[in-house]
Image: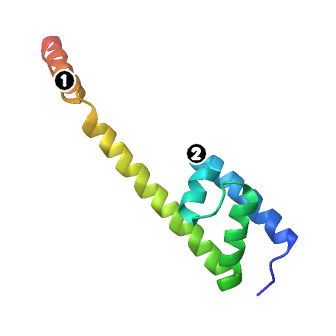
Amino acid sequence: MEKWNQNIEKEISLLIKDWLKQKGKTQKDLRIILKAGSDRMPALMEVLKEKYRSGGLAELAGVLCDIEQRWSESNSTNEEEKKAEDPFGQLDLLLEEIKEDCNT
């Protein structure tokens, strides 16, 4: 296993920044899951560095995949909750049916 070095840290840092941007998440979101001391990138990288040291790239990738899974599940739950909270959802459907009936 290759030891953690500045090149690896730079690559992981860029990956994390792009990943967070793509997922619409912040460093604070990542800090919460990693239980890091701060949401600053150096603190996040320190936690990821420890994961890398304990199991290499496979361990680090596993941690990031688990986080991805949790965020994905959280997003689908939030969407379902929003749908359930929409008090006019059923009225919209009924209105559409009435419009269709009037047009035929």
Mark positioned earlier in the residue sequence (1 or 2): 2
> Dividing the picture into quarters, in which one does residue 82 lie?
top left
Is the residue 43 above or below the residue 21 in the image?
Answer: below
Taking the spot 57% from the left edge, 65% from the top edge, the residue there is 35
In the picture as drawn, the residue positioned furthest to the right comes out as 6
> Quick one: quadrant of the C terminus?
top left
Question: Which residue bears the numbered disc 1?
Answer: 91
Q: Position of residue 101 (x, y in %)?
A: 12, 17
Q: Position of residue 25 (x, y in %)?
A: 58, 48
Mark nearer the viewer, 1 or 2:
2
Measure the C-alpha gap from mark 1 to mark 2. Answer: 31 Å
User: Which residue is the site of mark 2?
Assistant: 24
Q: Circle 2 sits in a helix, a strand or a loop, which is it?
A: loop
Q: Position of residue 94 (x, y in %)?
A: 16, 23
Closer to the camera, 97 or 10? 10
Q: Quadrant of the N terminus?
A: bottom right
Most distant residue in the top direction: 102
Could you tell whether 50 is left or right of 81 in the image?
right
